[in-house]
Amino acid sequence: MLIISIAMDENKGIGYKGALPWHLKEELKLFKANTLHHNLIMGQTTYDGLPRKLNDRHTYVCSLDPQYQIDDPDATVIYDLEAFLKEHEEDDEIYFVCGGASIYKQAYPHCKKAYISFVKGEFKVDTYFDIFQEEDWFIEKEVEYEDFIYKEMVRK
Ligand SMILES: NC(=O)c1ccc[n+]([C@@H]2O[C@H](COP(=O)([O-])OP(=O)(O)OC[C@H]3O[C@@H](n4cnc5c(N)ncnc54)[C@H](OP(=O)(O)O)[C@@H]3O)[C@@H](O)[C@H]2O)c1
């Protein structure tokens, strides 16, 4: 199963200058708790911008560059994202789609679930999750935190 994992602000903003526009400790903790011991899918830009290695998770990193390689047993490069998504969308195993913008956009139609932190406020951003439409989803779980509202959603 493919699950979107994302945080976005009130304008669907998700990134600024290659990084997250906010620092929300509680949100990062939630991301860790949700994703631990599962698979992650992310674009090369997001992977290379990670402040530290994400332990106890296998990361599939997307690149269209056949020369791009990663020297890490916990990471695998995907050169054809669409084929990978089609191959794994019906798996029992969980794959979290973790961005960035280009990967969310391509994976969106394949994902049956989305774990979204709706960050309170409007931030300075240059990257959006504009393919997202709330009416595509049922809310299964909702928890309010000080800086964001976390929702687990399932596709209608
Ligand atoms: N708010 C959140 O939850 C969240 C989460 C993650 C990221 N972000 C933000 O999103 C921004 C980065 O997004 P981005 O769109 O610039 O970069 P990205 O999606 O992380 O990575 C883009 C790269 O992915 C590869 N790629 C794209 N389509 C592919 C395909 N079909 N098959 C194989 N590889 C493919 C290409 O790599 P090559 O160039 O090597 O070919 C492309 O340059 C950052 O600001 C980051 O902080 C936000």
Image (cartoon, rainbow, N blue to C red):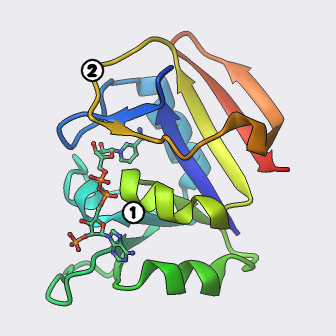
Residue 19 position in % (x across, y down): 24, 39
Q: Is residue 100 visible?
A: no
Q: Which residue is mark 1?
A: 42
Give the amino acid at mark 2: Lys
Q: Residue, x 44% and y 35% (percent of image)?
A: 28
Q: Quadrant of the N terminus?
A: bottom right
Q: Secondary structure at mark 2?
A: loop
Most distant residue in the left direction: 67
Q: Nearer the viewer, residue 58 or 132?
A: 132
Residue 124: which disc?
2
- Label 2 crowd (10 A; few <14 / some 14-19 / many >=20): few
Which dot, 2 or 1, sits closer to the camera?
Answer: 2
In the depicted structure, whether residue 74 falls above or below residue 24: below
Ligand 1's quadrant is bottom left
Mark positioned earlier in the residue sequence (2 or 1):
1
Residue 154: which disc?
none
- Label 1 crowd (10 A; few <14 / some 14-19 / many >=20): many
**34 sits left or right of 75 in the view:** right
Q: Is mark 1 within 8 Å of ligand 1?
A: yes
Residue 24 position in % (x across, y down): 40, 23
Q: Nearer the viewer, residue 81 or 32?
A: 81
Q: Secondary structure at mark 1?
A: strand
Q: Residue, x 66% and y 48% (percent of image)?
A: 114
**Quarter-wise, where is residue 81 in the image?**
bottom left
Residue 37 position in % (x across, y down): 56, 64
Q: Is residue 151 visible?
A: yes
Residue 143 position in % (x across, y down): 72, 23
